[in-house]
Image (tube, coloured by chain):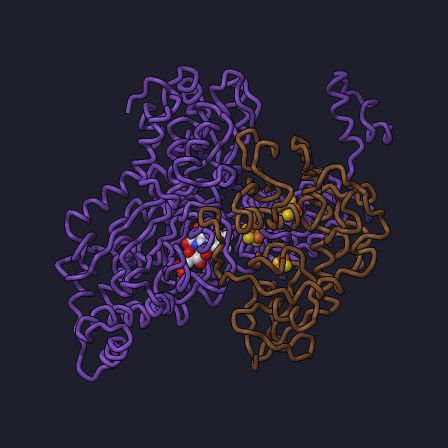
Amino acid sequence: MSETFQLDGEDIPFAPGQTVLQAALSAGHYIPHLCYHPEFKPHGSCKVCTVKIGGGNNTRTAASCTLPAQAGLEIESDTEEMNALRRTLVQMLFAEGNHFCPSCEKSGNCELQALGSDLGVMTAGFRHFYPDRPVDASHPDILLDFNRCILCELCVRASCEVDEKCVFSLSGRGITKHLVVNATSGKLADTDIALTDKAMQVCPVGVILKKRVGFAVPIGQRRYDQRPISAQALDDAPRPPSASGPNGSGVCQACEE
Amino acid sequence: MPQSNLSPELTTTGLTSLLDGQGRKPTRLLQILIEIQAAQHWISPENIDQLAAELNLPRARIEGVIGFYSFLHAEPAGQFRLLFSDNITDRMLGNQNLLEYLCNKLWLERGHVSEDGLVSVDTTSCTGLCDQGPAMLANGMAIPRLTRERLDEIAELVLQKVPVTQWPAELFVIENNIQRREILLANSMQPGDALRAAIAQVCVPGSAVEAAANQRSWREGIPSVALCAPVSTLEEIKRSNLRGRGGAGFTTGLKWEACRNAPGGEDNRTRYVVCNADEGEPGTFKDRVLLTTQADLLFEGMTLCAFAINAKQGFLYLRGEYRYLLEPLNAVLQRRRDANLLGANILGQAGFDFDIEIHLGAGAYVCGEESALIESLEGKRGIPRNRPPYPVTHGYLDKPTTVNNVETFCAAALVGLHGGDWYRGIGTAKSAGTKILSVSGDCARPGIYEYPFGVTVRQVLIDCGAENTLAVQVSGPSGVCIGADEFDRRIAFEDLATAGAFMVFDESRDMFEVARNFAHFFAHESCGFCTPCRVGTAMLKATMDKIAIGHGTQYDLAEIDQLNRILLQSAHCGLGHTACNPTLDTLKRFRPTYERRLKSLDFEPAFDLDGALATARRMTGRDDAGAHLSMEAES
Ligand SMILES: Cc1cc2nc3c(=O)[nH]c(=O)nc-3n(C[C@H](O)[C@H](O)[C@H](O)COP(=O)(O)O)c2cc1C
Ligand code: SF4
Ligand code: SF4
Ligand code: FES
């Protein structure tokens, strides 16, 4: 770990194969992120982790979770410009779905909400899309409330790569992109999902919910009610980077995307 | 191909034999789905279950692939699916009127399948027939030059339930409209000429090529003599200064060299040559004409590339809209196999093995982006990959892959025969050779024009007989829109780089509507992978629609600027980066057309109360002034 790059003026060491976000987090530096999860191959879709590369006039931007760390890179992250971009991206996600935080079971444990409050997002900023996304309550123990889905694909990845079930997949494209479940009926009850699945634990927002435990922990005492997401992400960070290489080696070959 | 039943149910055994025909490879999933769609006009839940079981794929993933491509349907979409091409050029030729006319004739609502399940009518993105529009796809087969008379005929055929394969051939006649030829379109090469010239090259003792061959020999473990010809070919392509014709303009020789340098698996021959014939950029149709008239030149260029980079397998990714070219292209491939220009030991050269397979697309513009194209070739949803790594090192099945445009391969074949120096002598300093333009819109002679690089926009306008020109959209929606004071600009990488589209708008046109059409295009074609483009293109479309109905404000114009910044800074691929271009270009050059639509206020709520009452008006059958808030306020 002799080589370093610069993040907001500080030297960040990195191991070969690490991306800028991975290296920053292991070194105790927070870059806001949403679709990245330390146990999975970086996805690069939410773009909340976008940073600026290079000094002077010759700059470009890139998602730091997928940007390979390289010696000598000069990265700007905690700047008003990058945070304004992130704020807008979070607003876009709020506007795209139906998020009624006060009545949401995930409130206080939700990464989107926590990120929004960290970044100072006060309103959606854009007009809402109010999409029509029916919930799936077919399963006896699990509720799927698609209204809150931010399409990060973490459940897709967890179910394929860890649970080896591929319960979830994405269909459609553009603004009509949506989650589908692996059953002819299209209902979760007809899949082989189990409460113990990894896919049950990874949703950053309030889509995949266990039934009958709602509001067990009162609002106000939940995860992000205690400390901001920036601090907690760093606690999670030093977990070993996923075993897979840059192109992944998920267990379920057929599910590999 | 007479069909007794219009939409035969594929039996379980029918599907099994279809799968056998496709070798049961998951990489052929998209091709399999396209075949099912063609045979049955939709893909049923039972089909999906069977595919999942027989290909050992999660069924949800198959559903996801179907859901990604416009031309695949997991629900019945009618035994006849009639899709009007909806590029701005089709609109200028009256496609909307014609669509309405046909819907009325068939007693249909646009976008809905008729109650008897017979037919549906809708729109689709540009079908590449802009010089002979308005156009449509009838069950995927292209029909140009629509008129009411032709639609009468089509409606009759539909009502008589005549399968599209038995419709009069005259409906499907597509013109090449080649208006101007230079070295490429006027070439007189015979199949194999460039390959024979390439194979015959020897190393001049003491030359740079010999040195390069020696160096490579050591690296690749191949005798130096055997490397002289491939290395010379690579050097000629580099010397020619040929740059990619698909839009980005990357230097072809460098791409090929990087691909050759990347490790090609155990036999060091597992590299892929991929031709990008997705041609999805609205207003572009030169690849269609090249595929029609220069297929041998194209395949010669791909084979030359295989020779230079040491590859065994090639693919042509043909956009679904050009489905009608599949059989003729396959016939050319077969002819070349018979002539030993493809297959094993090409032209008797031991170890020179190469063949080409054609894959069809199914209605997704983003699949023209090279990494999305590779995903699609692998049978998946066409989502652009994270780069690096780039296709030259990690492409198809993670192996080194060279992706080039149709025109690039054609030009490479010319270089193979005539040499790099000859080629670089044509065009300008930074843009060697010629460029083929697809000219459409307001002009007397739309069609295909080949020019040496450096031609001015004005010259093209004169040649195609354009008068009173207001604006030209160069390189399609993702390119630039220029006004009359810029017509002395030149078509070249150093000024107006272009993938070939050249859409002309005269003074009767409203450039706001042009930009709005393009905003709809990008929203429809966004793959939805990344937040900024998925949400941003939908917002831009909504904003343009809001302005169109007279509810826009200065605030909305400012929001467009903000969206553009977000997309430029954070979109995952070129589609998102360029999605705001048409709006910004026209705002800059034709601002009054926006402003006269704006409300004077600074802010206007997006929620349209009056609009929300429309349902109530329809239900009560009222449409008087008292039933409209706006009229009520005025009165
Ligand atoms: C959204 C998008 C669509 C594209 N569509 C096409 C296309 O239809 N045909 C094409 O040749 N290149 C297209 N490209 C460019 C390709 O990514 C790639 O650069 C090109 O095929 C390389 O070939 P060339 O070097 O010969 O130009 C597209 C790029 C983007 C971002
Ligand atoms: S359900 Fe949750 S984990 Fe799955 S894609 Fe949606 S937001 Fe992400
Ligand atoms: S920019 Fe648009 S088309 Fe490109 S990856 Fe993002 S969503 Fe897909
Ligand atoms: S965290 Fe990097 S793109 Fe989502």
Seen in the picture, residue B151 relative to B379 is either above or below; the reply is: above
Spot the residue most to the front: A196
The residue under the point 40% across, 39% down is B55
Instruction: Count the labels in the image.
Output: 0
Judge by depth and name the residue closer to the eye, B430 or B140. B140
In this view, B611 is above or below B191: above
Q: Residue at x 61, y 67 (%)?
A: A22
The residue depicted at 39 percent of the width and 69 percent of the height is: B428
Which hue is chain A drawn in? Answer: brown
Q: Is residue B282 visible?
A: no
Q: Tell me where residue B608 sits by quadrant.
A: top right
Which residue is most to the bottom?
Answer: B206
* Left-right relation of B21 to B438: left
| In-image side of A143 versus B413 (left or right) | right
User: Could you tell me which quadrant the N terminus of chain A lies in?
Assistant: bottom right
Q: Nearer the viewer, residue B119 or B230?
A: B230
Front residue of B444/B429: it is B429
Picture coordinates of residue B218 (x, y %)? 26, 78
Q: In the rendered image, what is the letter of the chain coloured purple?
A: B
In this image, B126 relative to B20: left or right? right
| x and y, in percent, of residue A35 in the image | 63, 55
